[in-house]
Amino acid sequence: MRYPLKVPPPSSTLQHINTSTLQHFNTFKYLRPMSVRIDDTIVALATPQGVSAIAVIRLSGKDAISITQRVFRGKRLETQPSHTIHFGMIWDGNTPIDEAVVSLYRGPKSFTREDAVEISCHGSPIIAERIIKLLMRKGARLAEPGEFTKRAFLNGRFDLAQAEAVADLINAETDNARMAALNQMRGGFSKEINHLREALVHFASLIELELDFSEEDVEFASRDDLRRLVNNIQQYTSSLIKSFDQGNVIRNGVRTVIAGRPNAGKSTLLNAILNEERAIVSEIPGTTRDIIEDEVVMGGINFRFIDTAGLRETVDVIEAMGVERTREQMKKAALILYLFDLSDTTLEHIEQEEAELKSLGIPYIKIGNKLDKSKPDLIKALRNKDFVFISASNRTHLDQLKERILSRYHLDVTPGDVVVTNLRHYHNLVKTHEALDRVIEGIDNGVTGDLLALDIRDALHYLGEITGKVTTEDLLDNIFSKFCIGK
Amino acid sequence: MRYPLKVPPPSSTLQHINTSTLQHFNTFKYLRPMSVRIDDTIVALATPQGVSAIAVIRLSGKDAISITQRVFRGKRLETQPSHTIHFGMIWDGNTPIDEAVVSLYRGPKSFTREDAVEISCHGSPIIAERIIKLLMRKGARLAEPGEFTKRAFLNGRFDLAQAEAVADLINAETDNARMAALNQMRGGFSKEINHLREALVHFASLIELELDFSEEDVEFASRDDLRRLVNNIQQYTSSLIKSFDQGNVIRNGVRTVIAGRPNAGKSTLLNAILNEERAIVSEIPGTTRDIIEDEVVMGGINFRFIDTAGLRETVDVIEAMGVERTREQMKKAALILYLFDLSDTTLEHIEQEEAELKSLGIPYIKIGNKLDKSKPDLIKALRNKDFVFISASNRTHLDQLKERILSRYHLDVTPGDVVVTNLRHYHNLVKTHEALDRVIEGIDNGVTGDLLALDIRDALHYLGEITGKVTTEDLLDNIFSKFCIGK
């Protein structure tokens, strides 16, 4: 499959561009191809591998229906209308393979906008595999990961950000992640971004038009209007960029490292949290297990807790390696739960440890453990110093700790909320913002149109990549290869 | 759910029976209820748990469509015809859950013969779970294992043997097992058994009619005709009973125990077979792994190979326990591959070991291993003694061993083949056969009609249980509880 359009890289040579610009701009340089010729028909299992009531095999492409007909007896599919269901038998020559139900979709009224078929057979891996191989012999090609969604995108069913949301939706592990993905799939920021981008394209066209008249020193594009537009766009991109802090938490959860000196009660705390939450979430009887890493959903957020080796000065080589690994884990954390053993430390030690902790620059929560065995003086001294006091082994005040953790995250995604959850979108928004900063700077410094145009084109490129108005084959491959097969 | 009919146990008191028999017989005593009132609507996930392109949630029951409508916006489902597909959004109140495609089936044109709906949503476990819980709040009940198929059976879509074949089809691990299950699902022996059973019911009715006229010494049922019919039936049941040897292999595979003295090369052989076949079957690069039990499909048959501890006389308690376990494994085997270490044994030892092996009464294959290191005299002495000579570590002659194993099984199930694969059917056929033996014996001895009738009723009961003409709630529960949820 080839995409006829090679999108120019940002800041590429501008000298080739001359008049007849507006039309040219909108339809060629900044737009992805809307109608890509996709000739072959793809097939894949759309349901998970495994024994179950039914398995669904999916075909898409111009021969989807005729290829299915070659193996299906029971009804003449070619003459049936779209969105109808037909019962029959799948045959491999004279060998019956399975009874099956065939669902017909005629393009463009299908997920991919192509003709499409879903075959529901009995949920046996050997049956599904045999039918897929049979369909491949009859002319279908095994789909690549994400190829159905890629076709839906290429055929204009939705934009790239929406296509990416399909994968996020499937992989959502919390209800907030599901809601954020669904919002994005249903449009999210796509419409607004395209709207702002179109306005910017308009300015870019006017400015590039100026280049043709450069000797006459005309200004088709009002610099004041441009500044106003850029400010508008930056206001929007700023809010999107800010939303990524939460979006990242929603989509990827919070990597939470439990650290502290040896014997501070780190493993006890981890097991207490996991068992507590497990008991609530899945009603599996809480058995105390020794775990060094596990996930749990609290307050609609997926927390990945990581236990670490105790931190202390040591001459023992092996132990020193453990301590080094712990420091690395702490640097990669989104949140550190730092335990102090109240029964075996002093205020001075605590202050010393906190200084080190602070120097990492990672958000942390200070936990005073072994509350039941602590010296009253120490607790008194730590009051109003933002500690959570617990006893992990007695499970005392774990609810307070949980509250403290959750208070950092205010997540309740509701229908229509626009949250950037995708790292690629975030990067592009940041780069757009930077390019627009340069545009403003250029206007302020009264630079010439051709230089302004360069930065505007950069911004347009990065914005366009988000929704797929600008794409390259590599970008698409990179995105869709992370999908599962059959989607 | 209650089944109004309580089927009398076989050989129950016959004295209650009097005239008006034939009609009575056919419609009440020997028939399962054809129309069971099933009031509630069931729901379950029909696809495996896991992240995938789509998940399918299935509903069946009189409210299937209206319950779906309560959570689905996009189209008025109630007015849509059967076998149509509708795109829309699943809503939980004002919260959108997922875009979904709804397939409508109106009874009796559905799998269960009831109104049924399939909801295809994105293949996320949390989405599927949320939709199922939502549907349960709206009036559906979570289906029990096999409940969809049970309803299909109770609503007369197919008989019990066919319903059981559905589960076999899903669980088929080889193409032969698939074909045997498909044949059974499409009718198999059901029709023939019902045909023979009807003829026998006719005789039973006539004989029981005689009882009302017992003082007059009439014989409505010709004993010669009855004998002929019973012989016919027994001819058929015999062939079905015989087919179970193969049927069992087809459905359950061959439990193959690898045994021999310590260091005979048992693990080496197991790993050689597994890696060899894996390489062929799945094209996964053959990595040598140490396995003590694994399955592999050869010649369309599923072999479960089990490695064992070496057999030898020992005073070591732990080792003795291992040897004991090996003997138990050998007794449970369908086939024993017995290895002799040709580099370290004598003819006398071999004969001694074989005598022990023979005494188990389990089919076995004698394998001379370490062919490359054996004494030529020994090989000469063993010639024509039915050995397979191999070198497991060099993978020499493994193909000959495979041929020898497969030569015991001639399996190539073709469309329409009738093979009994189900242990329950086998048991019932054996019991039918025995009851019919008693009928013949009774005729030979000129016993009275009431005694003959007892044995005929036994035969009718056991035959009827196969196809479900006779059922009890327990029997159905037992059968369908082994199905997966959603089927």
Image (cartoon, coloured by chain):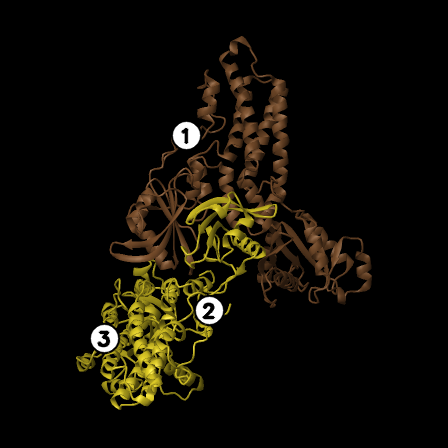
Chain colours: A yellow, B brown
Toward the viewer: A132 or A75?
A75
Toward the viewer: B475 or A370?
B475
Residue B452, quarter of picture: top right
Give the residue at x 76% y 53%: B386
The percent coordinates of residue B193 (x first, y second) are: 56, 31
A309 over B346 or under it: above or below: below
Label 3 neighbour load within 10 Å: few <14, some 14-19, many 20+: many
**Left/right of residue A295 with respect to residue B396 in the rendered view:** left
Under circle 1, the secondary element is loop
Q: Is residue B479 visible?
A: yes
A278 over A392 or under it: above or below: above
Q: Residue under mark 3: which chain is it in?
A: A
| Amino acid of disc 1 | Lys
- Labels 1 & 3 near each other (Cβ < 8 A): no
> Count of labels shown?
3
The percent coordinates of residue A345 (x first, y second) are: 27, 83
Q: Which residue is mark 2?
A: A481
Give the residue at x 26% y 80%: A230
The percent coordinates of residue B278 (x first, y second) are: 61, 62
| Amino acid of disc 3 | Val
| Amino acid of disc 2 | Ser
Determine if marks 2 and 1 fall on one subunit. Answer: no
What label does residue B6 carry, if any? 1
Under circle 3, the secondary element is strand
Q: Is residue A306 visible?
A: no
Give the residue at x 51% y 31%: B464
Toward the viewer: B247 or B315?
B247
B77 over A290 or under it: above or below: above
